[in-house]
Image (spheres, coloured by chain):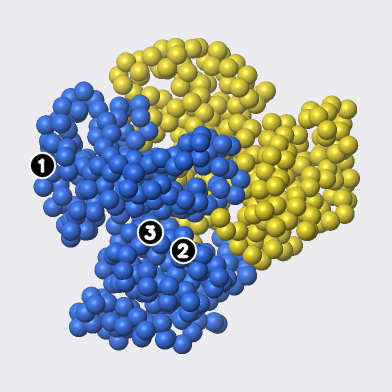
Chain colours: A blue, B yellow
Amino acid sequence: MATIKAAILGFGTVGQGIYHILNEKREDLRKKLGVELEVAKILVRDTSKERVPGTRHLLTDSIDDCLSVKGLQVVFEAIVGEEPAYTYLKKAVMNKCHVITANKVMFAKYGLELQELAKQNGVFVGYEATVAGGVPVIKTMKNILLVNDVTRIQGILNGTSNYILTKMRAEGWSFDEALKEAQALGYAEADPYMDISGQDAFKKLMVLSALAFGEQPNWADVKVVGIDGITPEQVKEAKEKGLRYRHVAEVEKLPDGTIFAQVGPMLVSKEHPLYPIDDVFNAVTMETNYIGTLTLIGPGAGMYPTASVMVEDYAEIIGKRAGFVVTI
Amino acid sequence: MATIKAAILGFGTVGQGIYHILNEKREDLRKKLGVELEVAKILVRDTSKERVPGTRHLLTDSIDDCLSVKGLQVVFEAIVGEEPAYTYLKKAVMNKCHVITANKVMFAKYGLELQELAKQNGVFVGYEATVAGGVPVIKTMKNILLVNDVTRIQGILNGTSNYILTKMRAEGWSFDEALKEAQALGYAEADPYMDISGQDAFKKLMVLSALAFGEQPNWADVKVVGIDGITPEQVKEAKEKGLRYRHVAEVEKLPDGTIFAQVGPMLVSKEHPLYPIDDVFNAVTMETNYIGTLTLIGPGAGMYPTASVMVEDYAEIIGKRAGFVVTI
């Protein structure tokens, strides 16, 4: 049986999740895909820390060491930030590796270029995990776009913000208490600025804009407001009126062809589709010409949801690459 | 450029929707798929009725006439009922045609056999349209199942029932008024028994069960209750308490491996995910091991939603068949 070799770049929450799932599903994936998958290298900054027992011999701090593995075909990337992630993935693609990324900051900026480069090199880019964690919004939209035009996208795209707003309302926690708990649960980054400022949701929205419309609005024109300005008093007052704060990102193609986007808090009533979306859940609504309005709801963060859609990307790519269709 | 020939079996609401979308998207599909699509035959019972102008020369009342078209590769099926649909699709598959069906009654009973036969003949079966209209629950579940195990499915699967319950509550309409309007809007069948008895939702649930678990429960063991027993007084009383009636179908795999399913009305509060799902909308929730709970919401009936997912099935199959991947 053929063996596919993979590297994992970044071994934090998501990177470890990939490793665990690949191990747990080894037999199953082999049966479904007809190939064996082997994690051959794991790129970390500090090779002296063995985060998962039995992985020390796989650790390296050199991207060239990763990419020089003989027969390497797949690179999973779960690093934070634009660089060096983009440089690494360009190298991987030029090395004829498929890449699967969870890095929204990098992909919002360089996604279209990276996909173009991948096309030239005959490999695929999986990026389901860049938006809405375990919710398969990228695959669903790609599929819809075969026949439908998407005109507008609206969603709760940051699980941490939604978790904090939920706990402030339902438990009466302060912002700081809710944030601390979100960090303890592994939802929020150690530096939570990206989450609570709205920048994380903005980056995900830009990934969706590029997919739905083939372009993004001028970033400087997009008003991005976070949840850090919402006071406990405002949350309490809204609750008494039967309303809830949601942090909503939206992008639409206007009739004149321009792309309009905005990100910020919104008060919704119980008739609004986003009213019941609590905790770390994300929701994405797409308006399309034939289907109408389609909404996807699921966990927007966490080790296993995010890592599992990356392994799905892998299974899909390997199925296509091998020229056969994965059937269940 | 290669031409792909297709037949449409049944030319009611959905069959006509397919024809319209294929015409409207002709250029676009040609560009995306690299092949030209031609509707070569349309199977109807009465060839003297030209339902869409310009189609008279395509009409036939003979399945053999359809399947003898030289170079026929795809059959869209939008007939109602088990037979003759199943016999027709078996013939089509043995004729090496891909088949794409919207027929939940046939597929609930014969779906697994038809897929097995298709596999033997090297062709594909698209059945996204059999469940939840325009909501891509089949593709999403297939994709998830590459890595996740689904343990439980719960959903509003009949748009007509949900529409009637919504209008009884929100507009104070009687059951009969709401049903008449649902029929006028093309949601309900002329014979609404399947919809309001819960049988339609049951059939869709059985399709989902076969996909998620590879098997169905014994049909005779499943309690199926429709909405026809719900009185206007009950709806009014629930509304006064802040509750809503939803018609819910659910299936789960119990720890001992048996499949348990039930279909019937349920009272939900505003905290329940199905509370805001009004009108003809459908919703499907899947519980999985890695991702957690995933919910899809969208229009469960109507010409264009249902027909458009069938054309998506076609685009996906042709992309795979041709050995290349459709990229957007």
- The residue drawn where x is 64% and y is 44% is B310
Which dot marks residue A109?
A: 3
Q: Nearer the viewer, residue B193 or A154?
A: A154
Q: Inspect this view and state whether residue B59 appears.
A: yes
- The residue drawn where x is 69% and y is 62% is B321
Say which residue label 2 marks.
A113
- Disc 3 marks a residue whose amino acid type is Lys
Count neighbours of disc 2 (C-alpha within 10 A) and say few if under 14, some if 14 to 19, many if 20 or more.
few
Location of the C terminus of chain A by quadrant is bottom right
Callout 3 secondary element: helix
- The residue drawn where x is 71% and y is 42% is B22
What separation in Å lies between label 3 and label 2 (alpha carbons)?
9 Å
Q: Position of residue B103 (x, y in %)?
A: 67, 40
What separation in Å lies between label 2 and label 1 (alpha carbons)?
42 Å
Do the residues under discs 3 and 1 have CB atoms within 8 angstroms? no
Q: Position of residue B106 (x, y in %)?
A: 68, 42
- Disc 2 marks a residue whose amino acid type is Glu
Image position of A41 with respect to B50: above or below: below
What separation in Å lies between label 3 and label 1 (alpha carbons)?
34 Å
Which dot marks residue A174?
A: 1
Q: How many marks?
A: 3
